[in-house]
Amino acid sequence: MKLYLNILLLLAITTIYSQNKITGVIIDGSSQKNLSLVNIYLPSLEKGTTSNEDGVFTLKNLPSGKHNILFSMIGYETQSLAITIPHNNNLTIHLVPSVIEMESIIVSTPFHKLQRDNVMKVEHKTLEHLKANGAITLSDGMTNIPGVESISTGLSIGKPVIRGLSANRVLVYTQGVRLENQQFGSEHGLGVSGAGIESVEVIKGPASLLYGSDAIGGVLYLNPERFANNNESSGDFEATYFSNTQGYNTNAGYKSSANNFKFLFRGSLTEHSDYKTKDYRITNTRFREQDFKAGVGYQKNAFKTEFRYNMNNAKLGIPEEIGEQSTNRTPLLPYQNITNHVFSSKSTMFFNNSKLDINLGFIYNDRKEFEEHHHDEDHGDEDHDEDDDGHDEDDEDHENAEALEAALHMKLKTLNYDIKYNLPDLGKFETIVGIQGMNQVNTNYGEETLIPDATTNDFGVLATSHIHFEKADIQLGARYDIRHIDVNSGIHRDFNSFNGALGVKTDILKNMTARVNFATGFRAPNLSELTSDGTHEGTNRYEIGNSNLKSEQNFQTDVSLEFQNKHLELFANGFYNTINNYIFLSPNGEFVDEDPVFVYLQDDAKLYGGEFGFHLHPHPLDWLHVESSFEMITGKQDNGDYLPLIPANTLNNIVRVEFEQPWLKQAYAFLKLRSSFTQNKVSTFETSTRSFNLLSAGFGGRIKLLNNDLSIAISGTNLTNKTYINHLSRLKPDGIFNMGRNINLSLHYFL
C-alpha cells in the first residue's frame, strides 16, 4: 500500500497539467432547434453535465489527452465523439431523432465503447429498464436478458446462469472489483442489493483474457450509480410493496458534486414473508436484507480517484418442507446470516496520450448458518401457533436464536488488484497491458467445517489491442495466469493457464453488423470441489471432494448478427462451447446419515445454442414496441449424459407502449408472456420439468408533486396464478412450486 501511495504521489508531482475546458451547443438534427437537458458525459473521467435551455454546455477542469464524450437524450440516437483536449474546445453536436433506446458505454470491456462499436457482444440493461418490464428483484431482472437465467429460492436467493454455466464458472463484478463470497454454494445469492445499481452488463462466454480464472462461463458486471453532475445535488426515496409476500423494499439516497469533490450514499431495507403459491405458502422462504452504499470521489486536473463501500446483511430462511403457514418475516431455524463488506478504490492518472488505471478491492464475507439442533429441543419439532392477531408465539425464540453459536461460521477475506496501462495510440492500434491478482484467506469458526481453512493466491498478466480498419474492427489479446492453493489440511496445488481471444466486427450489409469471436478460458477447482467431506443445512447430500482434480479449460466460438434500421431490429447469436475436464457432482450409491453421497468427477463436455429475436417499432406508431426473443441451450458430457442445471428453452414476447401527457411524463404500459418449454434433457440425478406460461403486465409514469417528480409503477407477475416449477428452482427436487400471483406498487420520489 505504501508503494502504491508513493507512486501516486510521484506521478501527481512530476506531471503538471493546465486546467482545460470544453464548451458546445447541441442541436436537433431535423428541426435545427437547440436541445436542452441533453446528458453530456465523459466515461473516462466519470464527469458529466446537461445542456441548458439554449442547448449550451460547459465542462471544466479536464486533463489534456484523448477522450470519448457521449451525448444522450430520450428520443435521440446516442452519439459518441472522440476529442482531443485542449484542441477540441468548441463543439457543435447534431443529434438524430430515434425511437431506439439510448446506448451506453460498455464498462466491462477494456476499451469502453458504445456497444455498436464494440467487438465483443455485451448485453447492457439499466435497472430502470428492467423494472419497467416487470422485474421484481435484481436477480429476477437478469432473466429478461437473453441467455441469462437464475438459480433461485423464491425472492431471497438468485444466482446468475449464463448459457448454462453458473456458480464459480460465472464471475460477478461490483464497484469495479471481483466479488468473492463463497459463490460455489447455491444456497445463498449474489450478496448485492439492486438499490444503488445503475445498470447490468453481461459478457456471455469465456472472459479469462480480461478477468482470469472463473470467468469461463461469462461475467455479470454491476455498474454502481453515478455521482451527481458537476455542481449539482439530488436525493430520492423509493418504496415498493409486494402483495404475494406482503413484503416491502425501501431505499433512499443523496448525492452531491462540486468541481473537485463528490459523494453519495444510499441505504435500503427489504423484508418479505414466505412466498405464496396458489394453494399454500412455502415455509421459511422469508428473509430480511439491509444494504448501505457510500462513495466519495476527487478529481484535479490529470488525476481522479474514488472510494466506494457497500455493506450487505441478509438473514435468509432455509426452506426444508411445507409447515407453518403465516406472514411472519422472522426466519425460522434453519437460517443463514450473511454479511458482505466491499471496499473498492479506483484511480486514474492521465498523461498526454495515455493513462494508468489502478483498481483495488477488499471483500470481507462473514457467513453463518444456524441449525435446528441448536434450538431448544422442546420446541424444535412442534408446530408454531399464532395468537389472535397473527403473532407467532415462537418469535422470541427465533430472535434469541441469533445469540446461539452458529453451526457453520466461515470468514472469507479477499484482496484483489487490477492495474492497466493504456498505451499511446499507434496508428490504428489501441493497446492495453496490465496485471491482476488476488489474495484470499478462508477461516472457519463454527463446529462444522464445510471447506477447510485455506489461502489462495492468483497472479495474471495480459495484453489486448483494438485495431481499427476502414471496414472492420479487430480485437485480440493474450494472458497468462497462475493460481496457488494452500490448504491447512496439507493439500497444496498449483494451476496455470495461457489464454487468448480474437474477435472481428464488420458491417456485411447496410444496417447489418456481424461479430465473430473466438476465446479460451479456464477455471481452477474451488475449495469445495477439492476438499469437501460432509453435509450441511440446505444441501440434502453428503459431498466428497477430489484433491486430484484438474483445471477446466474451454474454447468457445461465438457468432452474432444484428440488423437495425429506424423501425426494426433483428439479432441472432449462436455459440459452441467445449470444456475439457468439466467438474460435476455424481451420486455413488452410498448414504451417510440418510443423505446420499455425491462425489466430484470430471469429463469433457460441450454446450451449444443461441438467442434470437426482434424489436419492432413501426412507423408512424413509434410509441408502440413489439419485442420477441427465443433462447435455447444444450449441455452434454462426452459420454452422452446431459449436464445439470441447463435452463429450459424459453420464448419471451412483450408489447410495450410509451406516451407523454401534459400531466404524465415518461409513461408506459406493457404486456408480457414468458413461455418455458419442457426440460427433459436432464442429468442422471435431476428431475425433469414441464412447460408453463407466465403472464405479466404493468404501467407507470411520472407526475409532478410539490415541484418534484414522483414516479409511480404498478406491475403484476404470474397474473393467472399458474402453479409451475422452474427448472432452476432449488426447491424443484421437493416438488415445491414457484411463486404465484404477485402485484407490485412502487413509488419513487426525486428531490
Image: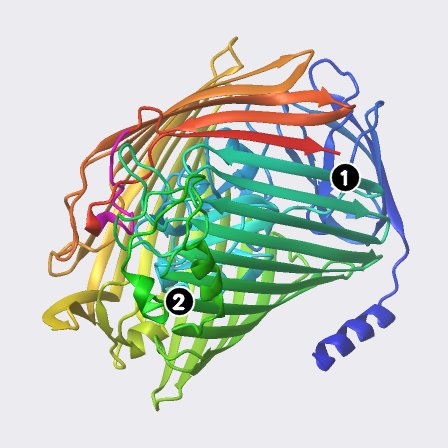
Q: Residue at x 62, y 27 (%)?
A: 77
Q: Residue at x 54, y 20 (%)?
A: 668
**The furthest residue to the bottom:** 490
What is the quadrant of residue 233 in the picture?
top right
Q: CA distance from mark 2 to mark 1?
A: 41 Å
In reply to whether residue 619 is colored magenta, the answer given is no
**The furthest residue to the right:** 18
Q: Nearer the viewer, residue 568 or 199?
A: 199
The mark that comes first in sequence, 2 or 1, is: 1
Q: Nearer the viewer, residue 729 or 16?
A: 729
Asked if the residue under mark 1 is in contact with the one under mark 2, i.e. CB atoms within 8 Å, the reply is no
In reply to whether residue 728 is colored magenta, the answer given is yes
Point out the image quarter for the N terminus.
bottom right
Locate residue 584 relative to residue 695 in the image: left or right: left
Q: Nearer the viewer, residue 19 or 679?
A: 679
| Disc 2: which residue | 370
Magenta range is 722-732
| Disc 1: which residue | 234
